[in-house]
Image (cartoon, grey):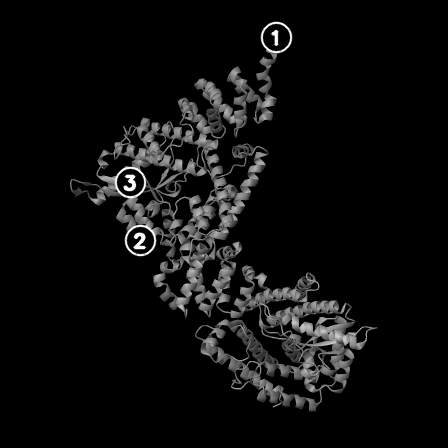
Amino acid sequence: MTGDEEGAVDTVPRIQTTAGRLARLGFVDGARAERLLGELGPEAAGDLGLLDALVATADPDLALTSLNRLAERDPGVLGALRQDAGLRAGLLGVFGVSAALGEHVVRHPEHWRLLTGGDAAARPSAERLRAELLRAVGAEPDDPEPRAAGADTAVLSALRVAYRGRLLHLAARDLTGGAALAEVTAELSDLAGAALEAGLAVARAAHPECDPVRLAVIGMGKCGARELNYISDVDVVFVAEPRERDGATADENEAVRLATRLAQAMMRACSATTPEGALWEVDAALRPEGKAGPLVRTLASHRAYYRRWAKTWEFQALLKARPVAGDAELGGRYVDAMNEMVWQASAREGFVEDVQAMRRRVEAHVRVEEAERQIKLGPGGLRDIEFAVQLLQLVHGRSDPLLRRRATLPALAALSRGGYVGRDDAKALAEAYTFLRRVEHLLQLHRLRRTHVVPDSEGDLRRLGRALGMTVDPVGAFTTRWRQHANQARRLHEKLFYRPLLVAVARLPETEARLSAAAAQARLEALGYTDPAGALRHIGALTSGVSRRAAIQRTLLPVMLGWFADTPDPDAGLLGFRQVSDRLGTTPWYLRLLRDETVVAERLARILGTSRYVTGLLLHAPEAVAMLGSDTGLDPRPAQALLAEARAAVGRYPGEAETAVAAVRALRRRELFRTAVADLEGRIGVEQVGQALSALNDVTVQAALDAAIGKVEAERRAPLGTRFAVIAMGRLGGCECSYGSDADVMFVHDPLPGTAEKDATDAAYAVANELRRLPALPAPDPPLLVDPDLRPEGKAGPLVRTLASYAAYYGRWASPWEAQALLRARRCAGDAALGEEFLALADPLRYPAGGVPDAAVLEIRRLKARMEAERLPRGADPALHTKLGRGGLSDVEWTAQLLQLRHAGDLPSLRTTRTLAALRAAVAEGLLTAEDEAELAEAWCFASRIRDAIVLVRGRAADSIPADVRERVLLSRALGYPPEASEDFVDDYRRVTRRARRVVERVFYGS
């Protein structure tokens, strides 16, 4: 080798370890790092493998500092690091995160050898950990009740040294990816159990007089669930019994006194400060009565307390109870006894509300300045996830044993498999929980201190980010990811933890929660189901099997059965639910929506058990269930938005009129559902219902007209050649449609210049016939019957007239009833200008100057009286017929219309097509008293609500209040009356219409 080559080799270490180079590699203090590397010697300073391993740690400066101090105590470590890549990654990985474990290894340099050899990557069993820690205090692991060599400081220090050696071994595997989170927390819990066993051995050595007692240590909280942190209080409960010896049993009180002495000594053995520090606090505050209660109780005393005095949170704590040390047989009996009560606790009055209140109290005690950085107790922290999971477990675990898991992540997975939590929600919660626990571990490892507060210093945040594998902008990347997980956890916590369905499920009797077949039929009959056997068949069809769908249905149905029972027709509700579920059961969002959005499930039950009409609409468009989740989603949509959507549907099918109108009818069905649900829920009144239904019919007629014109023009291969308008009449014209209303209309056309009138009329006839045909074609969607019978001369007259023909007819032949009918005329579709021209033509007839003559008034009165006498159906009760009966719709409408015919020519405020608007205008003009208007309006609204409710309840139109008692009950319930008040409903209607009839006789008939 030449001299130049030798010089080049000599400079390699210096080039690689200059301060600037080290700073660029990730050391914060490059100069200090250069000095420390130099102190390790030229061989270490030039070791690129060592340098790379240091640079890869979370905090290279911290790792190098601990390594430098260890090398001073044991220089052999440097050679071992060069030879063993696993040791290098593990030991330096720990040094780069944990200053405390670095200090421990410096104090006990022999412990770095725990990370070498075949055991370095092996997970020790719980038995091995127990044996090691017992031997550390001089106890024999195979003894039934191991006793330590003593209880002095040396023994306690030996326990701590052995414990931290195992902590070092676990941390190295954890930080290098050799152990998953579940393994880490389980091993920490096993290690804590071993330490408690060793502490109990020390206690026995200190108090040999306590031999006559059996003591079991029950792990609670994270220790019981085998999900312990690196540094945490270890929650325990003590249970004791006197030992039987030579056929005699010690006094129970004396046994408890001795066991208390033993328990106190065990707690001191773990928490006492020694030259090697303390392990952790042993916290027995979760015992009955908390810190105010006795430290130790017998099993019988525990059982008596929980049966009589325990609060809700105490059962929540028992969810994680597990024997961890001491007498295993006694501990097992304790857990078995407590489990009997834990899984029934959710049936206690106010259980869910108590747990929710406890979470709010915990959150309220977080220091304000730490709340946003608290990963345990703050919003979006670990407690949010744990409380949500535990509440769901306790509520649903009563009837589903598969949910009875102690640890959070396995419980969450079981909740997801059972359908109690959506897969995506469970995945997001699990990811958030795993991330937050890893952050918690990194925080605690740094100083081996119990902390859950994310630091705000850049150096600490940088160490956290790098430890989590974030090498590019570790501070920003860590902060962003932490906030994302916290926000997601908080959102899902509020969604799941405060889900109203939990309260409903918790209140169910246990047999009902399990849908027990033995008692179910009697229970259903008691709830009001008239066909309990049929209901059981529906329940069986919905819940049988092992599918996720069946699992979710088993959660939903116990609650929904009660909701159905509160409706007028529970049997119809359950049948409708089965039918809707059969159609949507495989749709991912459907059952998830019902489970997660209680308002949807409860609202669905209510409408299915009330309205056959809405059920029918839903069966043909089950996806409309999604509307039920939002109150604003039930508000009627603006007519212009509906028209734009309908015309877009027609435009998608040029030349296919039937297909186009079918799409429009599907839109109409969806909007009928929206309006009907809003009506049943009381979100809109009878006037708004009429306006919404009329606007929807307008849109349907206009879209059908567009399709009809397109079809006729295509068949004629020529433009229509005439303007065409549709004039709404009757209830459509008055914007007072009900669910069963036809579309009463007249057709008017006006030939365009250059078009022969006969050709134009033929085209108009073709359009009118198509317009009548298309919306009434057989289809799953409700038909809209376009009825032109109110045209001049009725059915005997021409279907379509020109504007000039209407002018000639009305000028010569119009009768008073036709003028009265025109009071409701308005354009609803077609050519707007033509429609206005028609209305201008009609105005002198319907709004005559000076009012209609007395002879016409007399004729109108005679016609009304004849209708009452002749058109009322045979056998109908005049007092209960909503349209033609006394004080019914006809009475009120004819009264308003007579006022218009007599005065609208001189009073423009009366020129409206709407009944209630005309009555209000009459009051304003002094033609009607406010009291009379109120009586008429109340009767009109009541009768209109009844007609709407008849369609909603029965699924078909009728004008009379049903005589059948059962149907009358269903109708009255839909109108808001209690179950036993159907006769009150009838009495109310008779009273309201009787008062209205007195006004009609005075105002209309002039009596």
Q: Are marks 3 and 2 in contact (CB under 8 Å)?
A: no
Three-letter amino acid code of the residue under disc 3: Ala
- In three-dimensional space, the C-alpha distance between marks 2 and 1, rounded to whole angstroms, equals 90 Å
Q: Earlier in the sequence, mark 2 or mark 1?
A: 1
Q: Earlier in the sequence, mark 3 or mark 2?
A: 2
Q: Residue 382: image x %, image y %?
A: 47, 44
Q: Label 1's element?
A: helix
Please tell me which residue lies in front, 251 or 142. 142
Task: Mark yes or no: residue 975 visible.
Answer: no
Instruction: Please name the residue shown 34% across and 27% down the image.
Output: 158
Please tell me which residue lies in front, 10 or 591. 591
Q: Are marks 2 and 1 in contact (CB under 8 Å)?
A: no
Instruction: Please name the residue shown 40% across and 55% down the image.
Output: 351
Q: Which residue is mark 3?
A: 328
Three-letter amino acid code of the residue under disc 2: Arg
- In three-dimensional space, the C-alpha distance between marks 3 and 2, rounded to whole angstroms, equals 23 Å
Q: Label 3's element?
A: helix
Q: Which residue is mark 2?
A: 307
Task: Mark yes or no: residue 462 visible.
Answer: yes
Q: Which residue is mark 1?
A: 3
Between label 3 and label 1, give the one nearer the viewer.
1
Crowd band around label 2 with a 10 angstrom C-alpha radius: few (<14), some (14–19), many (20+): few
Q: Are marks 3 and 1 in contact (CB under 8 Å)?
A: no
Task: Please determine whether, in this image, residue 812 is positioned above or below residue 181.
Answer: below
Three-letter amino acid code of the residue under disc 1: Gly
Q: Is residue 524 left or right of residue 748?
A: left
Between label 2 and label 1, give the one nearer the viewer.
1
Crowd band around label 1 with a 10 angstrom C-alpha radius: few (<14), some (14–19), many (20+): few
Q: Is residue 147 left or right of residue 861?
A: left
